[in-house]
Amino acid sequence: MKVRDSLLNGPLGFGAAPLGNMFRNIPDDEAAATVAAAWELGTRYFDTAPFYGAGLSEVRLGKELSKHERSEYLLSTKVGRLILDEVENVSERDLGEKGDIFRYGRPNKIVYDYTADGTKKSIEDSLARMNVDRIDFVWVHDIAQDFHGDDWLGVFDTARRGAFVALAELRDQGVIKGWGLGTNRVEPIELLLQLADVKPDASLLAGRYTLLDHELALQRLMPAAAAKGVDIVVGGPYSSGVLAGGRHFEYLPASKEIQAKVEKIKSLCAEYRVPIKAAALQFSLAHPAVAAIIPGASKPERIKEDHDAVKANIPGDFWRDLRARGLAASNAPLPIDR
Ligand SMILES: NC(=O)c1ccc[n+]([C@@H]2O[C@H](COP(=O)([O-])OP(=O)(O)OC[C@H]3O[C@@H](n4cnc5c(N)ncnc54)[C@H](OP(=O)(O)O)[C@@H]3O)[C@@H](O)[C@H]2O)c1
């Protein structure tokens, strides 16, 4: 099933990675207030993953959403990592180049498992942590170079024979609405779309279709997804924060080069009095392949900014100027092209 046909209140969802204590120790009440603010402002699509704080994001999100009927919101989570009861020394974890961002999360041991059985176990565990009876969309998480290095193709093959088969069965049985990949990299989703025997419904592409970084996705992935009717959910639409006033790009302190590009975008925004969050979210949404955007936040006040950003009136000349100054790829669809 398509994500766009399942959305209950527009394309703006909420990405719950920060609730797993991403970058900092977030008090429970602040995390709860962030989800509550999203609900109050009308967000009805929530994305999380076992990886986010070793289950912490799912627990926190589930607790807050349990105040509402399950039929009133759309929920996605991920498979590919199991969270064990066993705890470990968090400082000794080796979870890839971004593995350290959840050092304030729960200390439970995290193990990769992209098999069919591991996929079903992961879903059972997520249902229990969130105390819900179903998940709508399931993304196979992080089969990509940033977590698996050059072995990522081997991991992809394991998932192809395991997770992909299990998820297709669950989808065909009506247990879930759909499945796909959830990655920070373009290549795995591009590869997924090329497979003749595999029929994903959608995929979550994080950080690679943003105002700051979209060229690679535009070459093949986005046109292929649009042509095949495979919805793209844009994760990390603020490039993990730097586009919204934060310090991070790709979950690390932003480099001088990135900061310089952000400054150029910011000064164009200032000229047209356009909030940079509005430019960022409306840029990602303008591609016809994009069904939803799921900015993350750990503070309740961010949520109104996100909702205002989607609704903001942006003059056509802003977009024309953005293109003319080379701040958006010449082939990137913009809201004025619709
Ligand atoms: N592999 C995958 O499948 C994958 C990978 C990455 C992301 N995702 C999904 O995409 C979602 C969104 O990604 P993301 O949360 O990593 O990044 P993001 O949406 O690009 O940016 C979120 C960050 O922006 C910051 N921010 C927002 N407004 C701000 C403001 N006014 N001033 C300063 N900072 C501001 C937030 O800070 P505060 O925390 O201070 O509010 C938060 O840390 C995730 O939650 C997850 O659901 C999936």
Image (cartoon, grey):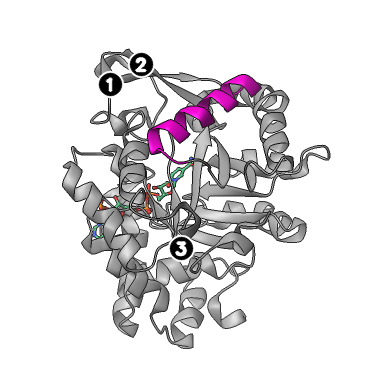
In the picture of the structure, the residue carrying the numbered disc 3 is: 211
Q: Residue at the spot x=50%, y=69% of the render?
A: 10
Q: Is residue 208 magenta?
A: no
Where does residue 227 sit, x and y in percent of width and height? Answer: 76, 60
For badge 2, the amino acid type reads: Asp
- The residue at the point 36 percent across, 50 percent down is 65
How crowded pointer 3 is (Cα within 10 Å; few <14, some 14-19, many 20+) is rated as: many
Secondary structure of the residue carrying tag 1 is loop
Instruction: Identify residue for label 2.
Output: 85
Residue in the foreground of this view, choosing between 296 and 92:
296
Q: Decide: is 230 above or below 27.
A: below
Residue 253 visible in the shown view:
no
Residue mark closest to the camera, 1 vs 2: 2
Image quarter in which the C terminus is found: bottom right
* 202 is higher (above) or lower (below) than 21: below
Bounds of the magenta span? 114-132
Query: Considering only order in the chain, which callout, 1 or 3, is on the residue closer to the N terminus?
Result: 1
Give the SS element for disc 2.
strand
Q: Position of residue 44 (x, y in %)?
A: 44, 61
Residue 146, placed above or below residue 226: above
Cα separation, mark 1 vs mark 2, equals 9 Å
- 118 in magenta: yes
Q: Which mark is residue 257?
A: none
In the rendered structure, the answer to whether residue 127 lies left or right of residue 199 reads left
Q: Position of residue 325 (x, y in %)?
A: 46, 74
The mark total stands at 3
Q: Nearer the viewer, mark 2 or mark 3?
A: 2
